[in-house]
Image: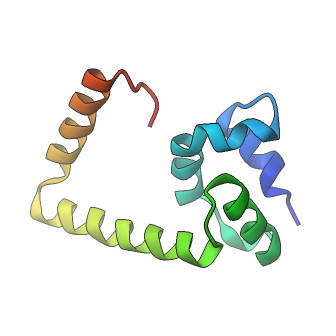
Amino acid sequence: MNDIFKDMQVKVGCEYISDLPSHKRKVWQKMKRLNPADYEEKQLENFSKYVFGMSYQTLKDVMNQQKGREEQCRKQGYWWKREEQLTKKQYHTGLNCR
């Protein structure tokens, strides 16, 4: 089995594993593309609590809810508006990572 802590450290580009909680947005984006079958359930639980402060089940529920919302936006043609809103928000708040 793979080690999610080390894999995320590499994917996010952190020097130390302890930096992961301060890069939640990047970790979140990588988590959405992650294959959970590559990791043990206990390790996913520990990672989720360490980085996000919530159980892995809660994290999965939120991801599924967001995925459904994103698919609905795409079907309705609103996906471009969401991207545009994120770009404006990042410009106005100075956030440059997703």
Query: Residue 5, percent across and down?
Result: 80, 51
Q: Image quadrant for the C terminus?
A: top left
Query: Residue 21, percent across and down?
Result: 66, 44
Looking at this rendering, what residue extends furthest in the right direction? 1
- The quarter of the displayed image where residue 41 is located: bottom right
Q: Image quadrant for the N terminus?
A: bottom right
Q: In the visual, does 18 lie left or right of 76?
A: right
Q: Nearer the viewer, residue 45 or 4?
A: 45
Q: In the visual, does 33 lie left or right of 46?
A: left
- The quarter of the displayed image where residue 20 is located: top right
* Residue located at (37% from left, 67% from top): 67
* Residue located at (11% from left, 64% from top): 76
Query: Residue 48, percent across and down?
Result: 67, 63
Instruction: Count numbered badges in the picture.
Output: 0
* Residue located at (76% from left, 40% from top): 9
* Residue located at (19% from left, 52% from top): 79
Q: In the visual, does 94 lie left or right of 77?
A: right
Color encoding of the figure = rainbow
Query: Residue 16, percent across and down?
Result: 82, 33
Q: Is residue 31 above or below residue 93?
A: below
Q: Is residue 77 above or below residue 67?
A: above
Q: In the visual, does 77 lie left or right of 89?
A: left
